Amino acid sequence: MAKNRSTKEIERKFLLKCLPPKGILWSTLRAKYTTIYLSTSDPELRVRRRVNLGSISYSLTVKIGESIERQEFIHPIGSQLFSRILAKRHPTVVEKDRYRIKIGNLVWEVDNFLSDRHQGLYIAEVELESRGQKIHIPDWLDVEKEVTNDPRYYNKNLAVHGIPDPR
């Protein structure tokens, strides 16, 4: 079983203006995620199943803080615990495919949300080394629609409320 992990997460998130060229996006499927949010307040508490190239992992994650920078603690759990929680038919489940696109020295992760309440939503995020790190925004992202600091687009809030009204 994997070890516990604690990291500081610094990321920016954007809505997509259009899908990246098919040859880029669809050839880079990284993983399928099923996430159940047990607490959406701060600290956030979730359990997750990650399926990647035939391997499956399960984890419990605690995230502290909101916005661009947060502390994240990840602890591996067993499949039985995840299955027991999933069997409770928890209303805060998010399912998504995640794609990785390397541009320069950064890796963009594009999430395609699959749950009924989230279909059609794509969010791209990039993890940074520092808050002020300069990045090149790919042309398929909407620079005007950075949602890093928009709580409506935090995964935990998407789990509870579905896709937000764009207004």
Image: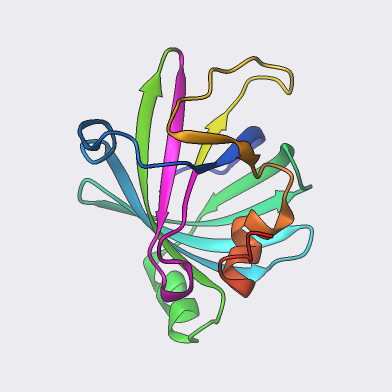
Q: Is 125 placed above or below 98 here?
A: above
The residue positioned 73% from the left and 40% from the top of the image is 70
Residue 120, how many percent across, how many down?
41, 61
State whether residue 112 is above or below residue 68: below
Return the residue nearer the eye: 44 or 27.
27
Residue 18, given in percent of the width and then of the height, sits at 40, 42
Residue shown at the point (40%, 76%) measured from the top left: 83
Q: Does the magenta-highlighted stretch encompass residue 120?
A: yes
Q: Position of residue 93 (x, y in %)?
A: 50, 72
Q: Note whether 160 is above or below 62 in the view shown.
A: below
Magenta segment includes 77: no
User: Percent x, y for residue 94?
Assistant: 48, 66
Residue furthest to the bottom in view is 88
32 lies left or right of 68: left
Which residue is found at the position 46% from the left and 13% from the top?
A: 105
For the residue pair 119 and 61, the one nearer the viewer reads as 119
Looking at the image, which is closer to me, 69 or 16?
16
Quadrant (top left/top right/bottom left/bottom right) for the C terminus: bottom right
Residue at 53%, 82% (x, y): give it. Answer: 90
The magenta stretch is: 105-123
User: Where is residue 62, by image quadrant?
Assistant: bottom right
Residue 37: name its quadrant: bottom right
Number of numbered discs visible in the structure rendering: 0
